[in-house]
Image (tube, helix red, strand yellow):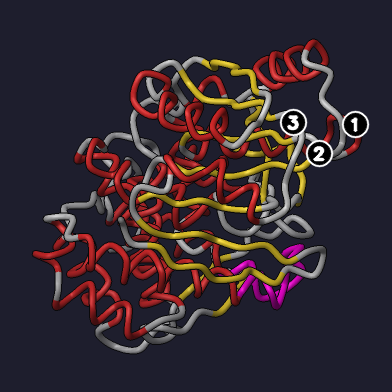
């Protein structure tokens, strides 16, 4: 039978459901019909996932009477590009998609963001469905309506705010997720605990063995809590004009790391984990965080085997990358810091020497800085 739960995200632009459970891929067509969605369906996935999850999804669409076609994108962050979006446009035009048609993203963050951006711009907006296949996408990119692609100068520089019509999260896909990708997703769940949900932080700390073994009940608990937290933040600030910026905790350093290493060294969650370690250290160095916050942050990240160091990268160069981040405002880097566990604040005008000191303490290359 499987497990199934449903909750709503109430963004200002629209309200949409998130279905969370097991064996939902095989029910996707039926779920879409029950929610009143009809028309043609163009599925976007990658070459790796097509052999794993495409058959049950396509079978469910056929059973529910959807006319469908599939676009296969190469696997990898480097393919989150305008060139691949054009490939989706070409398929949509050939299939004669209409505004009532569906674009279905079957994949992780790359596929979800790319498909969402295509949906937001094709015919000035068609409906799209998120079916996230990684833990990271299930708790992060599939919730909140940020869509986009990368540019050579930075991650997600080209994009839009565009909410999905629905998110269908099937926990069974995590059975085949490799360990490194699973840990990458846990980083975003840890982030939710650190900046807004102390109960989630405690659960991750006390139930780590169940989480690591991918217990269905443990996964339901932490994914539900992380999604509800993000949904609540999005409801308050859909277009990132204020509080939603706290969701960028760990991303200032993390995105700079990803760009500096050409997206090929770190998974997104790994880069964010390093960024959270750095943000916690910066919070301590500038006196914003209470004593013990940095130590507790490091304890949780290490408990799940996530990286917390920056080996072999010049601190000055990494700092320069941060200045190009899309979250920079009036030339100032905006930092999300944690005064205490479960609380976040946004700060700018932090002394560059403090940032460089933190980066060097974490292993970045630099000299002439105070210890």
Identify the disc placed on residue 118. Answer: 3
- What is the quadrant of the N terminus in the image? bottom left
Residue placed under numbered mark 1 in the picture: 123
- Residue 187 painted magenta: no
The disc, 3 or 2, on the residue closer to the chain's N-terminal end is 3
Label 2 SS: loop
Cα gap from disc 2 to disc 1, whole angstroms: 7 Å
Q: Which mark is residue 126?
A: 2
Q: Nearer the viewer, residue 55 or 16?
A: 55
Q: Residue at x 75, y 59 (%)?
A: 329
Start-end of magenta stretch: 233-246
Q: Which mark is residue 43?
A: none
Q: Position of residue 11 (x, y in %)?
A: 73, 68
Q: Earlier in the sequence, mark 1 or mark 3?
A: 3
Label 2 with label 1: CB-CB less than 8 Å: yes
| Alpha-carbon span between mark 3 and mark 2 | 9 Å
Question: Is residue 237 covered in magenta?
Answer: yes
Q: Residue at x 33, y 66 (%)?
A: 190
x and y percent of residue 288 in the render?
A: 45, 84
Q: Is residue 7 left or right of residue 135?
A: right
């Amino acid at each position: 039978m499987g497990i199934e739960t449903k909750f709503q995200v109430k963004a200002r632009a629209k309200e949409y459901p998130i279905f969370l459970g097991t064996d939902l891929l095989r029910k996707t067509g039926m779920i879409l019909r029950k929610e009143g969605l009809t028309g043609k369906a163009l599925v976007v996935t990658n070459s790796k996932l097509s052999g794993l999850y495409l058959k049950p999804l396509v079978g469910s669409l056929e059973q529910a009477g959807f006319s469908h076609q599939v676009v296969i994108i190469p696997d990898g962050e480097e393919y989150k590009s305008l060139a691949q979006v054009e490939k989706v446009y070409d398929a949509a035009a050939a299939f004669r998609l209409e505004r009532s048609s569906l674009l279905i993203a079957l994949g992780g963050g790359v596929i979800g963001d790319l498909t969402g951006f295509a949906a937001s711009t094709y015919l000035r907006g068609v409906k799209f469905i998120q079916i996230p296949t990684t833990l990271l996408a299930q708790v992060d990119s599939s919730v909140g309506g940020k869509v986009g692609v990368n540019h050579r100068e930075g991650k997600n520089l080209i994009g839009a705010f565009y909410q999905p019509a629905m998110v269908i999260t099937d926990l069974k896909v995590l059975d085949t997720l490799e360990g490194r990708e699973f840990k990458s997703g846990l980083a975003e769940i840890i982030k939710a605990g650190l900046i807004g949900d102390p109960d989630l932080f405690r659960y991750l700390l006390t139930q780590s063995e169940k989480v690591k073994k991918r217990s269905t009940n443990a996964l339901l608990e932490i994914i539900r809590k992380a999604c509800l937290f993000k949904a609540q933040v999005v409801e308050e600030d859909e277009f990132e004009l204020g509080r939603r910026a706290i969701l960028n905790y760990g991303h200032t350093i993390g995105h700079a790391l990803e760009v500096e290493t050409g997206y090929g060294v770190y998974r997104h969650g790994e880069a964010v984990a390093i960024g959270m370690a750095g943000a916690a250290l910066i919070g301590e160095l500038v006196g914003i965080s209470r004593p013990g916050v940095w130590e507790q942050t490091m304890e949780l990240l290490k408990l799940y085997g996530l990286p917390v160091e920056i080996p072999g990268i010049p601190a000055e160069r990494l700092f320069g990358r941060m200045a190009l981040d899309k979250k920079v405002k009036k030339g100032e880097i905006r930092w999300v810091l944690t005064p205490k566990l479960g609380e976040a604040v946004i700060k700018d005008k932090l002394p560059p020497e403090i940032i460089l000191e933190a980066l060097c303490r974490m292993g970045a290359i630099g000299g002439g800085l105070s210890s």
